[in-house]
Image: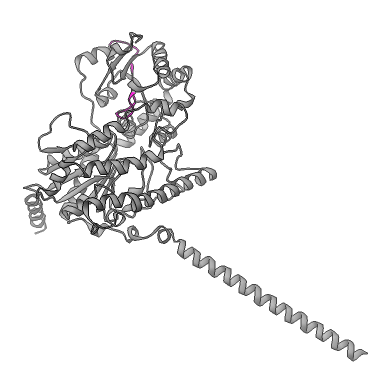
Amino acid sequence: MKGSYWTYALILAICEFAGGSRILMATMGGTKSHKIPFLALARGLISRGHNVTFVNAFPQDSEYPGLEEITPLNFVLYVKNYTNWDLLGMRMSGQEAVPPADVLRYGYYACDALLSDPETHHLMNSGRQYDLVIVDGSYPECPVVLAHHFKVPFMYINSVAFYMTSITHGGSPAPFSVTPFLARPFIDDMRFLERVKNTVYMSGVELVHTAFIRWILEPLMRNYFGKEMPHIQDMVKNVSFILQNGHATVTYPRPYLPNVAEIACIHCHPSKPLPRDLEEFVSGSDSGFIYVSMGSSVLTSNMPEMLRFMFIRVFSQLPYRVLWKFEADEGSIPDLPDNVRLGRWLPQQDILGHRNIRAFVTHGGLLSMFETVYHGVPVVTMPVFCDHDANSAKAELDGYALKLELQELTAQKLLWAINEVIRNPKYRESVKSRQRLLRDQPEHPLDRAVYWTEYVLRHKGAYHLHSPAREYSFIQYYLIDVYTLLLAGIIISAFMIFKITKITLECHITRNVQLVSSQAVFSA
């Protein structure tokens, strides 16, 4: 009888998804890396028979059967110009590559570009029906209105692991004592002054973020959705489930509630053979090769001339071949050494998994750090903006990376760092240890993500996983009101005890004085 029950349950589950659910995805991410975990999940869901529509700012490189990508032109053009400047040069000069004001400005203008575009209007007014919306935990406030519009549950893929505001939307704690601010090189075990700074940063970001949403972003969105649109803060708190792009082995252990699942390396896969020309290059030296890439958002073709010259000088002194992701043709660098090859686009995971690779030189982007651990390659990082500092600090803490500060970078430091991570076995041993930990999971992160997505679909939003903590204010959540009451009680009690003691002593002294006086009179 028990076997019949499970057979019947399995048939029901298969029938439920036989036609496939309709899922709408959206990311406001300003770099192409935000798109990667969404594409991985989309392909996993499509393989299960679901239909996926994906709104983003990066036109697709190739079609994938079953995936519909919508790239509103206004949105695409705004994002394309957003990081099209010399981020490396700004960091080298000691400036913030992307200042806080620009982070807020991006949230406003990217949202306006998305909502004002005719393609977005067509999507929302075409009569389409969806069963679930999945938005990016980075800048979720704008696309979350899609779930409100279609009247369906929504989830997050929190693409930036160290961005914890979206995690708190679901009620999970992010105590400042062990949650480092993503834009600073802190770790989770902070000294006192670091905890003070971290608290100031995190509190300041929360206050500014809340004010920005309430007084700037929300009025913009009401221009498109009317005054009846709920408050953004109320909408984001209703998130059904969060797929957190992190894992305890490559980010930090975290006290998540049951409505959070970690999916770091959802996009990771074993390396495939390289194209013939690349294979011939990386296999052409007995010493091996190093791979240099500053990611999809930091354009090395825009780097300062002095930094480009420094890189070339260092690479020419290495006994290894150098494969360098560079957004220009090889003819654009007349002094390019013979051991260096450029590529506008390179298959990063296939390169990192190659048997001849010796080291990876990178900006410290989250996905690059996941991939270097997954494939077991020691790394030299040069953080530029956003979470690069936090990612690099964690990798250095785990022993498989050396972090260089661009503002203090010299050819000697870069040359030493590359040789150090290659020749000192502790870096490769550390990354191989992390690789074993990352891969030691009961299922692939993609399978986990697909399961929980279908779980939310099966249970119509899975609202039973919600914690009342998501409705609490900062004061309620951290018991500041309770501690204030208790402290007030202690102070009042202490004051009363002091007063009573004082009055008692005064009475006792007065009585003693009177007694002494009366005795003196009697004696006289």
Foreground: 115 or 134?
Answer: 115
Q: Quadrant of the N terminus?
A: bottom left
In this orientation, does residue 409 appear? Answer: yes
Q: Point out the residue furthest to the bottom here.
A: 522
Give the side of residue 77 with respect to residue 17, left or right. right
Q: Which residues are magenta?
A: 284-299
Considering every residue shown, the one lying at the far front of the view is: 223
Q: Name the residue rendered at 28%, 38% in the picture.
A: 29
Name the residue located 12 percent from the left edge and 33 percent from the top edge: 64
In front of the other: 421 or 300: 300
> Is residue 404 rendered magenta in the image?
no
Residue 371, located in which quarter of the rendered image? top left
Residue 478 percent location from the top left of the image: 43, 58
**Count of numbered circles on the image:** 0
Point out residue 66 in the picture as x, y percentages from the top left corner: 10, 38
Q: Residue 137 in the image: x percent, y percent?
A: 29, 45
In the rendered image, which quarter is residue 112 located in? top left
Q: How is the image coloured?
A: one colour
Q: Position of residue 416 (x, y in %)?
A: 46, 19
What secondary structure do most residues of the magenta stretch adopt? loop
Against 392, residue 310 (above or below) is above
